Image (cartoon, grey):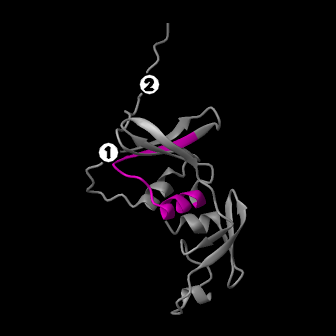
Amino acid sequence: MKEEKELRVSKIENGTVIDHIPPGKGWAVLRILEIPAQTDAIVSILMNASSGKYEKKDIIKVEKRELTEEEVNKIALAAPNASINIIRNYSVVKKTRVELPDIIEGIIKCSNPACITNSSEPVKPKFRVINKSPATLRCLYCERITREEEILDQF
């Protein structure tokens, strides 16, 4: 009889679990969260975990933290199928899927150095989402297409 060994990550009391991150995109999500090296919170990352819905996935658990709307929007750019679970007293109290809005404003920079949003003008970068997965954006000012790789490089 073959003995099965499994490493389990313990439940968190309060915080956030980001699930269904595409495999390998967990690092980008961690960069988005900007967790300081000197944190007292427990942070867990599972990479290439088995998934029933997808073949593999990454998962991130962060204790003592709930995400801001801006962080959720950034995660939608990096992991458009992710789900976010808010945990309180070891129970899921809210579960949402990230959703990439049709217009992205002020979250990332335009990849065109000559775009007005990259000048000294007080103009926030603004993009129309032309593809949600993989994320592909069109700048509303200069029409430059920004692809997923360029987006992830900004985090």
Query: Who's the residue at 50% across and 57% down the image?
Result: 28
Q: In the picture provided, is 82 more to the left or to the right than 34?
A: right
The tag earlier along the polypeptide, 1 or 2, is 2
Q: In the picture provided, is 60 more to the left or to the right than 150?
A: left
As measured in the structure, the alpha-carbon distance from the residue carrying label 1 to the one carrying label 2 is: 20 Å
Q: Where is residue 123 in the image (x, y as percent from the top left)?
A: 56, 87
Q: Where is residue 8 in the image (x, y as percent from the top left)?
A: 41, 29
Q: Position of residue 52 (x, y in %)?
A: 62, 32
Q: Looking at this view, is 88 or 62 the one in front?
A: 88
Outermost residue on the top side: it is 1
Q: Position of residue 36 (x, y in %)?
A: 32, 59
Secondary structure of the residue carrying tag 1 is: loop
Query: Who's the residue at 30% across and 57% down the image?
Result: 37
Query: Tag 2: residue type?
Result: Glu
Give the residue number, with chain letter if any, for mark 2. Answer: 6
Outermost residue on the front side: it is 93
Secondary structure of the residue carrying tag 2 is: loop
Query: Tag 1: residue type?
Result: Ile
Part of the protein shown in magenta: 57-77
Dot in front, 1 or 2? 1
83 over 28 or under it: above or below: above
Q: Looking at this view, is 15 or 38 the one in front?
A: 15
Q: How crowded is mark 2: few (under 14 residues within 10 Å), some or many (20 or more)?
A: few
Give the residue number, with chain letter if any, for mark 1. Answer: 42
Query: Who's the residue at 30% across and 48% down the image?
Result: 41
For residue 150, say whether it is visible: yes
